[in-house]
Amino acid sequence: MSTADRLPRLLALVPYLMSHPGAQVPEVAKIFGLSEKQLIDDLQLVWMCGLPGHTPGDLIDVSWDGGEIVIDNADTIARPLRLGVDEASALLVALRLLAEMPEFGERDALARVIAKFEQASGEGAAAVSSQVAVEVDAAPDALPSVNEALRRGRRLSLRYYVPGRDEITPREVDPMRLVVVDGRPYLSGWCYRAEAVRLFRLDRMLSVDVLDVPADPPADAVPDEVTPGVFRPSPTDELVELELTAAGRWVAEYYPCERVTELGEGRVRVALRARDQGWVVRLALRLGDTGRVISPASLDESVRAAATAALNRYESIF
Amino acid sequence: MSRRKTERLLNLVICLLATRRPLSAEHIRQAVPGYDADNDEAFQRMFERDKNELREIGIPIEVHKDPWEEDPGYRIVRQAYELPEITLEPDEAAVVGLAAQVWQRASLAEAASGALLKLRAGGVETDEAYGVLGGALELRVDTQDPAFPALWEAVRDRRAVRFAYRAAASQNVLTRTVEPWGVVSRRGRWYMVGHDRDRDAPRVFRLSRIGGAVTTVGRPGSVVVPEGVDIKSMVVYSDAAIRERTALVRVRQDTCQGLRQVAKAVRPVGDGWDELEVDFTDPGRLAGWIVGFAADAEVVGPPDARDAVICRLKGALA
């Protein structure tokens, strides 16, 4: 937190201490994202402030003997400042997103919370939050089974489609978490085939069965960190350079690129990391005359070979 | 912000909250330590800046101008300042905890955690440990586009914006002036919906195609969102269209798994090949997908879909 945020912080800290008498220094520092030293410094500052007159009787009284914080004589700022438009909107947009979630189990609580916040935060935030929306994908067929497995702690048996390799593979997965990223649901779980934590898109599960086996992921397995971006190329993946025309620029929008160089007239050269050569060949074929593999040259040759083989089929039939 | 300034501002807030009747600037100068007692001009400047800073963090300062008083009076009305009493049941607190961790980027993530801090300071327990679905549900929304914060503010402040924009597949970057109605995230992409002043019509813009800075045009509050506008439905594009035509595609056995999944009929035709019926709308889009399977797939008909594939393959060889 920067120093510019200090006043808003103090205006929350004092009410927090008033409503939590006897709170401990380490615990409060953690909640406010401060070091213990910074917190003490805040307390010392507060202790210098108070009502006009500023006689000892007017000043806020704070002590932190033995790490236990006691505050007194701060009734004027005993309540926190109301939520700002951004603060209330950030929560309301997120709450409305939850309301869109198919199979969300806490609808009743959600409706109550939205009503409370709309009331507490005034018109501005209610208006903004109806103008910012996150669309949620239609419920994938797999969702009820995945939810059930998570709820009951059961292993799942999947048939899973990987478009990059055009492959359907059977997997046994111990579900750990349902993660909805930008409105699209993923299952994070221990995959016995990969012997690692993997992220599975629910709409790519072609079939899913809840097994009568308790989920038992290794104790040290940590759910995959899904931010930022679910598609994370590894630095060891091969770096591929493509040149795109204006009509092929969508590639730069869809895939994370390490470099994007404008070439004029809307043309662009991009460098991206690809785990799988087959994926790049597929992409280059799809691009047709709107994109070309520049390097590695061997990959461009594979694209040409694939295109020639495919064209031969069309020409041999008639 | 220096420590002395923070102290002065905190004392100013306490002073303005404690008073029942509005206080003149001169009165405040005497009551709050830290203001220049000798130089009137320096004091005026400092007081103006202080008031602005308090307003920026959402503190409502009321200005009274009585006809019989020469100088305006200032105070903070407690009811406008304080967070209203909110109580949350445990299930409601869990939902709020889930909503507060949705945002992944600085501006909104800070707004959400600021809101949470104020709630806690007001004695509301938002227990993140309880969680929904036993803590196994997580939602994440990324706002990675550089244009997002400026557009959020423009939507919030109801202000028109101007920016450089490259339409899909276009060779040119054009300046657009738009009255924003809202921003929508769909399948991981952010869109702005609004009235395009140059085209005098509603338009949808993808944030990733905005280049450079977004500037505001005109006064806050000047944009009127037409009643009954459904911003979400405006970004649903053609992939929701009815797939009204059927293509006949020959595919090698044990290949083209993705294509087989969407086929409405699959029949073997001998020699290790199957024939699929695949619904489509746009021959170009169908071709873009089919060419990726190279020599493992061949569109038999209709002729325009077949030609689209041939054209794409020749493009890749050009």
Image: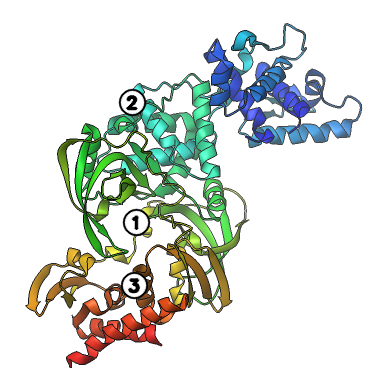
Say few, some or many: other residues with alpha carbon within 10 Å of mark 1 (under 14 / 14 to 19 / 20 or more). few
Marks 1, 2: nearer the viewer: 2
Q: Nearer the viewer, residue B134 or B226?
A: B134
Are dots 2 and 3 on a single chain? no
Circle 2: residue type:
Asp
**Which residue in the protein does label 3 denote?**
A282
Circle 3: residue type:
Arg
Q: CA distance from mark 3 to mark 1?
A: 32 Å
| Circle 2 SS class | helix
Say few, some or many: other residues with alpha carbon within 10 Å of mark 3 (under 14 / 14 to 19 / 20 or more). many
**Which residue in the protein does label 2 denote?**
B91
Q: CA distance from mark 2 to mark 3?
A: 48 Å
Give coordinates of residue B41: x percent, y percent: 87, 34
Chain ID of residue with mark 2: B
Say few, some or many: other residues with alpha carbon within 10 Å of mark 2 (under 14 / 14 to 19 / 20 or more). some
**What residue is at 37 percent from the left and 31 percent from the top?**
B95
Q: In the picture provided, is A56 more to the left or to the right than B234?
A: right
Q: Earlier in the sequence, mark 1 or mark 2?
A: 2
**Which residue in the protein does label 1 denote?**
B233
**What residue is at 38 percent from the left and 48 percent from the top?**
A181
Q: How many marks?
A: 3
Q: Nearer the viewer, residue B48 or A147?
A: A147
Chain ID of residue with mark 1: B
Q: In the picture provided, is B272 more to the left or to the right than A189?
A: left
Most distant residue in the bottom direction: A318
Q: CA distance from mark 1 to mark 2?
A: 32 Å
Circle 1: residue type:
Ser
Quadrant for the N terminus of chain A, please.
top right
